Image (cartoon, rainbow, N blue to C red):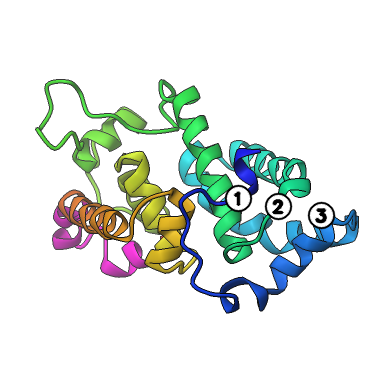
Amino acid sequence: MADASLPNSTPSGPAAWQEDPDVQLMLRVQGGDAFAFEQLMKRYHARLVRILRHVSGSDESAEDLAQDVFLRVFRARANYQPSAKFSTWLFHIAHNVASNAIRDRKRRKEVQVYAPATGSQSGLMTLDQMALASSGTMPVRKLDKVERAEMVRLAVEALNERQRMALLLCKFEGLSYQEIAEAMELSVQAVKSLLSRARVNLKLMLEPYVNSGEVTNTDVKSE
């Protein structure tokens, strides 16, 4: 099964996974240990939902996608071959699930906000445009904390799929460039390039709001 290993990954040595307790749990799952699988679900459920919420746009859909990830993990147990940390393998599967979800739901507004065909060459909408698309009204007052967080979320979702996933794995999960590269089947240099472009695009979209005080650097970091 394609999800059973990390294609084109470059293991960094035995210590990269042999000392990972989650790898040991997965090996127990491979041997038929249902309790070990339950432990992995408890450890990673909230983390997966947090990542996948940025793909699906809702908690309910994120829960469904997380269940799909765990189902794939369980189905792949017989062919599981540890060559990296368990989290790297898991997020590789999550990346595939997220990519499929985006393709299947790309016409739904909550998945991704698209710029109009006549928009800027960058293909990015301003936050005013995103707010208009989301609520039907332009922001005319100072945003409260919830609304600021929503603006940041919209900005993250306006990134293209690969930029968004790389940013989420780096920001939320603290994965290294190498681990993100393995999870997304990219080179380390490609990951660095994705993260650089993602940060530039976020800055361009949020800068007017940061400068006006409506969105702060803290909001951006805490989203």
**Residue 27: % across, % down:** 78, 62
> In the rendering, which numbered label is found on residue 5?
1
Task: Determine whether the residue tagged by mark 2 lies in a helix, strand or loop.
Answer: loop
Task: Determine whether the residue tagged by mark 1 lies in a helix, strand or loop.
Answer: loop
The residue shown at (21%, 39%) is: 128
Residue 70 versus residue 9: which sits nearer the camera?
A: 9
48 shown above or below 213: above
**Crowd around label 1: few <14 · some 14–19 · many ≥20 (10 Å):** some
Q: Mark 1 belongs to which amino acid?
A: Ser
Residue 34 versus residue 115: which sits nearer the camera?
A: 34
**Residue 173: % across, % down:** 50, 65
The residue shown at (65%, 43%) is: 69
Majority secondary structure of magenta residues: helix
> In the rendering, which numbered label is found on residue 30?
3
Please state if 175 lies on the left or on the right of 137 as rendered: right
Quadrant in which the C terminus appears: bottom left
The residue shown at (36%, 56%) is: 167
70 shown above or below 21: above
The CA span between labels 2 and 1 is 6 Å
Choose the circle earlier in sequence order: 2 or 1. Answer: 1
**Crowd around label 3: few <14 · some 14–19 · many ≥20 (10 Å):** many
**Residue 199: % across, % down:** 24, 58
**Residue 164: % across, % down:** 36, 48
**Crowd around label 2: few <14 · some 14–19 · many ≥20 (10 Å):** many
44 shown above or below 2: below
Please state if 102 lies on the left or on the right of 163 as rendered: right
Which residue is under mark 2? 80
The answer to whether mark 2 and mark 1 are in CB contact below 8 A is: yes
- The region drawn magenta spans 206-221
The residue shown at (71%, 74%) is: 21
123 shown above or below 74: above
